[in-house]
Amino acid sequence: MRKLSLVLIEFKHFIVLTILIIISLIILFSNDNTQVRFLRALAVGFYGTIQSGFSAIPNVFKLEKENKLLRENNIKLANEIANLKESKLENIRLSKLLNLKEKSNLNLISGKIINKSLIQTRNFLTLNIGENDSVRINMTVITDQGLVGRIISTSRNYSIVQILYNKDLKISVKCQRTRLDGILNYDGVQNLTVTNILKNADVLNGDVFITSEYSSNFPSGIPVGTVSETGNLDNIFKKITLKSNVNFELLEEVFVLKYLPDKEKTELEKKLNLK
């Protein structure tokens, strides 16, 4: 009791002030005087403004959290849309390859490109298939658009393709329309050219060249490219430039044709220095 008395004595000014404030508020809110009503409305408005200001503070943090969640959801949705588009494009490409496999009587092995070189003089592709998938050196690589190249190296699970745009690759080809024979090679810059075509030969822009039956490395009849330019190389031969039927920059999947050159024919021609 004594302690309570001491506390009351020590805080008597605060207690008296609190009581007076309460009494003043009671009088203020019970008084219907015009001036008092004005002050009361002013006080209520001031209190409401202060309260709304303080209530906005937690809303800022809440909005920031909601915005973060929305951004995360947008990123997820964008990734899902991108994956759906990629799946759609992949289905289109694979459908074309599957259509080729179903229409063809050839024995084909499907593979995916996991690396490529297109800016050198000896360009190549790396495939995710190898000896475990029955891929062998010298097998032909194609797409539904035409010839890609040939296998030049293999491991158990991977293989390297020497493509048309490689200076070391030379292919016997013929004009599909006129049956003229020539040799396809890459000039090391950007063009596929056909040599050994005489100056007066009947070759026009838009003519298609295919692999020839004279080729030791490729089966005949595979589309290689379309003539994009003709002219005179010299007084004897014609200059012919081809555009490959295959878009190597966009190429992602290929087929390896389970075809190997006739070893007996190749060895015989080598002995006689015919190749």
Image: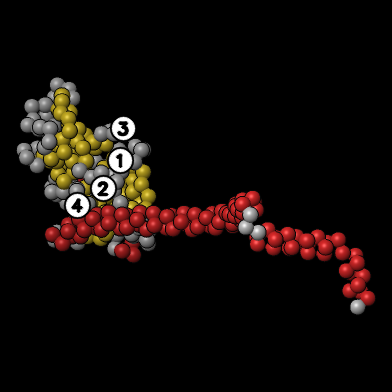
Question: Mark 4 or 2 closer to N-term?
Answer: 4
Q: Please, what is the three-letter code of the amino acid marked with disc 4?
A: Asp
- Give the number of the mark in front: 4 or 1: 4
Q: Are marks 3 and 4 in contact (CB under 8 Å)?
A: no
The circle on residue 149 is: 2
Residue 151: x percent and y percent? Answer: 29, 52
The quarter of the picture where the C terminus appears is top left
Q: Is residue 170 above or below residue 141?
A: above
Numbered mark located on residue 52 in the image: none
Residue type at mark 1?
A: Asn
- Dividing the picture into quadrants, the one containing residue 248 is top left
- Name the mark on residue 189: 3
Going by the numbered disc 3, the residue's amino acid type is: Val
Q: Measuring from the top left, give residue 55's x and y in whole percent.
A: 59, 57
Q: Secondary structure at mark 2?
A: strand
Going 34% across and 60% down the picture, which residue do you hit?
Answer: 130
Please report whichever mark, 3 or 4, sits nearer to the chain's N-terminal start: 4
Residue highlighted by disc 1: 166
Earlier-in-chain disc, 2 versus 3: 2
Q: CA distance from mark 2 to mark 3?
A: 18 Å
Viewer-side residue, 110 vs 135:
110
Residue 11, located in which quarter of the rendered image?
bottom right
